[in-house]
Amino acid sequence: MNTEFLALAQMAVGGGLMGMAYALVAYGFQLTHAAGKAVNFGQGELVMLGAFAGLSLSTAALPYWVSVSGAMAVGAALGWFVERTAVRLALQQRNEGWILLTIIVGLFAVSAAENIWGREDKPFPTPWPEGALEFFGISVTWPELAIAAGALGIMTLVELAKRYTMAGIAVQAVSADQDAAELCGIRSRSAISLSWAISGMSAAFAGTIIAPVTTVGPTMAASLTLKAFSVAVVAGLDSSFGLLLAGIALGATENISGFLLGSGWREAPGLILLILALALRPQGLFGKKIIRKV
Amino acid sequence: MLKVENLCAGYSGDDAVRGISIEVAEGSCVALVGANGAGKSTLVKSLCGLIVPRRGSVFFCGENISALPASEVARRGISLCPEGRHVFVPLSVEENLLLGAYPRLPSFGRFRRAASGDLQHLYEMFPRLGERRSQQAGSLSGGEQQMLAIGRVLMARPRLVVLDEPSMGLAPMLVKEVFKAISSLRTAGMTILLSEQFANSALAVSDRAYIIERGSVVLEGASAALAKNPAVMAAYLG
Amino acid sequence: MFAGVSLGMRERTAERIVRITVFVGLAALPALWQGQYALGLLTLMAVYGVLLIGLDTTVGYLGQVNLAQAALFALGAYGTALTVQAGATLPLALLAGIAAALVPGAALALPALRLEGPQFALSTLSFATLTIIVLNELESVTNGALGLSIVRPPLFMLRLNATSFYWLCLVALFVAWESSQILLKSRFGLAIEALRDSPTATDALGIGTLRHKVLAFAWGSALAGLAGGLHAMNFGYLQPAAFGYDLMVMLLLGVVFGGRRSQWGAFLGAAIVAMLPNLLSNHLLFSVLVSLGCILSFIPLIRAAISRRVPFFRETAPAAAMAIAAILAFFVPNMEEWRKGIFALFLFAVVVGFPNGIAGAMATRLYQLIRFAPLPLPPATGGVPSSRRSSGVALRLSDLCKSFGGVKAVEGVTLEIRQGETLGLIGPNGSGKTTLVNLISGLYAPDSGSVEIAGTQPARGSLMSACSAGSARTFQNLQPFYGLTALESIMICQQKREKSEAMGWLAAVGLEEKARIRCSEMSYGDLRFLEIARALATRPRLLMLDEPAAGMSKPDIFRLVDLIASIKQAKVPILLIEHHQDVVAELCDRVAVMDGGRLIALGTPHEIRRDPKVIEAYLGSDNTETFEQEAIPC
């Protein structure tokens, strides 16, 4: 096989695996959008805080799995907090103040993280073995595999919970028709809070699996929000399968364009694709069309 | 069982319901009859907690429920089958029915088993729903969706069933079927409050009725007597 | 109640006098408050003022969260810097800056403004990120991360020192302010206000939604370019990193903080954003600010405590945020490090507590204290003009179908309305009447079948095209332009902008007394009449009234019947959906009855009333054997 092709394939695989983490963060958008038609513009900050929480717990000499679970619990609490403080009131008043308020909460989160954990990037310890596996000449590191397994695992778990528990079906009912769900005795507010908590949890988990590859730092937040957004919007906010595809595609494109055009350009093609996708198909490639009513 | 006192409610602008008082006795079937836009739906929505009433109060089994949110009203045993059906379009027929029983099912664990008896009973009553139990509710026809909506209400084992315009948007054949179902609920001893624009059909299935025009009750009494009253016809065709 | 002082002048004149005073004061400031640093801050404030007035056009007037303004600002700055390096004069360089922001801004607006809410915010965010990447990476042109240095060019042989450049920036701010105000008060600006409230209505009335949005965004971009140009000349050194996410968030929050939809708000926001680093580094000043904010935010809480009620979230949240800010400010040793966080808390408190910003809150107080002289109104002219056509067909529907999922909302409807005819459309709830009107007016595209309005076939599913073919409609659920007055609502619907004609339409529906009242303060019944006047102002060849009497009181219904009768007399063809049978019987030449998406009867009101199919559709079957009860005669 020619080496240039192999290098490209290596890039694509590495990027695609990272892209699954973007898909997981984007999945958080999908969850909250389904429940209450709002998303967290500070989702990247939750990812960062989750990673930092995991880091603190593991430096406190807790076992890896305990730290990750702890980070997820922190993420869930933060997700709930964002909904309560920044989103609920604005949605009741049917205005778009929540966009600003979630940005503001994210701004505070970055400042808090800078002061609590410092501005510099830190490595994130994992129990995974050193070195890499090789498939057909393409090498994959253990943390990269952990991203794929973790993202798939969490998304599958949440999707299963949505289908096979009564609480999950109730959350789906609230997103389909809030009034009708209330009439069935479902407390829609709690269902929306639950979605935000799960969204925060998956963001924090994403943090703990991304951090071993990229390191942890306050600056990771902003670009992650944008990437996850791109994935969510390109895929549409209805399909979790679409998210994975879009995530993998974005990650691979980034790596390949970084390789071909120079590292500064790595994000550019994805962004151009995003603007085009929005313009041509606002509901996303896998999304459903909305009917206007008067 | 249900007592509504001097209720005023509306969305924006003028009240759509202007001081209505009604009563529903246990085990009876009461109809709210009136033309489109008379205020029936606003009344029904405000007594179920979907609209906060501006004045007046709603008592259910002696408790004032007028300030409660819809989910709490539902948990107290009033089940509304809303106007326009409002089934959960992306979910399956069976999931829709299970949601009807939501408050008494476990959130996690074996909820299907907990509801299996009620489900079976319901599928016997509406065999069409049984045939389509795993189909998406959105793919059902209008009449089937109405049956599903009624089924969802029954799954709650309600103390009071409120049906808001169950015939809306249905072909005449299906309307007949809907009324057949209502009539059998009544025979089974359910307490029913029925809001309906089709006066003849509504009066035929109910014990008592209130004729509503422009937000107020203009006539009330036993349904059989009202059905002979020419004023009812006048309320519709002017 | 305190009635307020009456001021013998119009609001706009008073505002202008205050503004000019402020500008004169600002221009004189360098003489009083000397020092390079102060002058730098003032210049920055003027530049940000231009930038934020531009941003307010999209964030405030258009109501869309625009995250591209910082990038457009950067493009303007680089455009100017590069032309200066090429030897351009100052005015030419500024023009280049404007163009450098305007062209990509318009190119972004065209696709992005088809989107709403978060999607729009996101596409602007992508554009911003992309811009910074390009500026960083296109090293041969922009010198990349190393930055670009320029020397300020002279203005017509005049060398500008710091003070005179500051004056130039003030002039630019004044010009931007005045022209924005004129623009946003014009018909164009009114249309923008209107489409924020109801894009469906602006399209259905032929005002055009997308066109106005793109132009507004372009205006905002041009101002960003101008500000960028000034910024480049002010600093003389540009680096892509300075225009990133942080600046953008600051700008956005500056607008919200100052107050949306107000040039004063943008100006206040600019002052805050420019002074902010200074405010935060000065310990004393900062402590005073935090304490003040804390006290202010606790007032509503104390009020709630006095009246013994549980405070609302919008009262507790700002107080909590300010309390945390105070703790950080007074008890944390490295307060400077927390700057961003404290700023975020301030913003949180303002966004939750004063959704209209500082200028908005001040304006509310001001209107309570001062009454301005009202604008004079011209006398009404015209009335309902008669339709030019007397023969032919006003509307022809053939075999129209539309279904949603498994439900057939409209099925095979074929119908004609003749010129000058009033056709009533009745039917039970959910029988498809409103869907039919939505199909005719172009809100929905039919699945099959065709619509022909006054001899032309509008494009499928286009409100604008149906409107230009001559249809005009009202909405069952009101779609008022809450931000506009009654008169303004009419004026934007007219082809020609004539106040007296608009007054004529208002007079026709009996609202000429309420011309100056904002729609948000009008009663429900009045808004229904205003919608009819709006539709009439487009001079329709087919008027569709969707349940005009819904929710109206009895006397209003009599007024409505008289109004429709007078429209009918003017031979305007009308499609009237109505539940009140007496209204239908009195007004309509023919009545069509729908049930279950189909047309089941068509005839004179008299015939319809006796049609057994119609009676069954309305009253239900009296064939009651299936109900296990005796048959009841009807």
Image (cartoon, rainbow, N blue to C red):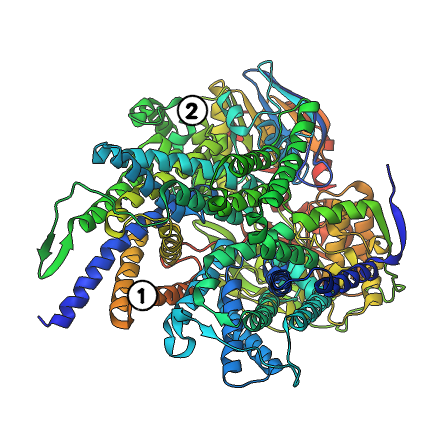
Determine which quarter of the picture holds residue C551.
top right
Write down the chain letter for disc 2. B
Observer-nearest of C370 and C200: C370
Residue at 70% x, 23% y: name it: C306
- Vertical comparison of A131 with B93: above or below: below
Label placed on residue C80: none
- In this figure, which residue is indicated by the disc labeled 1? A266
The N terminus of chain C lies in which quarter of the figure? Answer: top right
- Mark 1, residues whose alpha carbon is within 10 Å: few (<14), some, or many (≥20)? many
Residue at 57% x, 14% y: name it: B61
| Mark 1 residue type | Arg
| Mark 2 residue type | Pro
Label placed on residue B103: 2
Residue C287: image location, x then y, percent: 60, 40
Write down the chain letter for disc 1. A
On screen, residue B9 versus residue A80, left or right, reads right
- Vertical comparison of B188 with C471: above or below: above
Mark 2 to mark 1 CA distance (whole Å): 51 Å
- Mark 2, residues whose alpha carbon is within 10 Å: few (<14), some, or many (≥20)? some
Determine which quarter of the picture holds residue C163.
bottom right
Residue C17: image location, x then y, percent: 82, 61
Residue C302: image location, x then y, percent: 67, 27
Residue B140 seen in render: no
Observer-nearest of C204 and B217: C204
- Vertical comparison of A268 with B89: above or below: below
Residue C253: image location, x then y, percent: 56, 52
Determine which quarter of the picture holds residue C505.
bottom right
> Regarding mark 2 in the picture, which secondary structure is present there?
helix
Q: Nearer the viewer, mark 2 or mark 1?
A: 1
Q: Which residue reaches farthest front?
A: C35
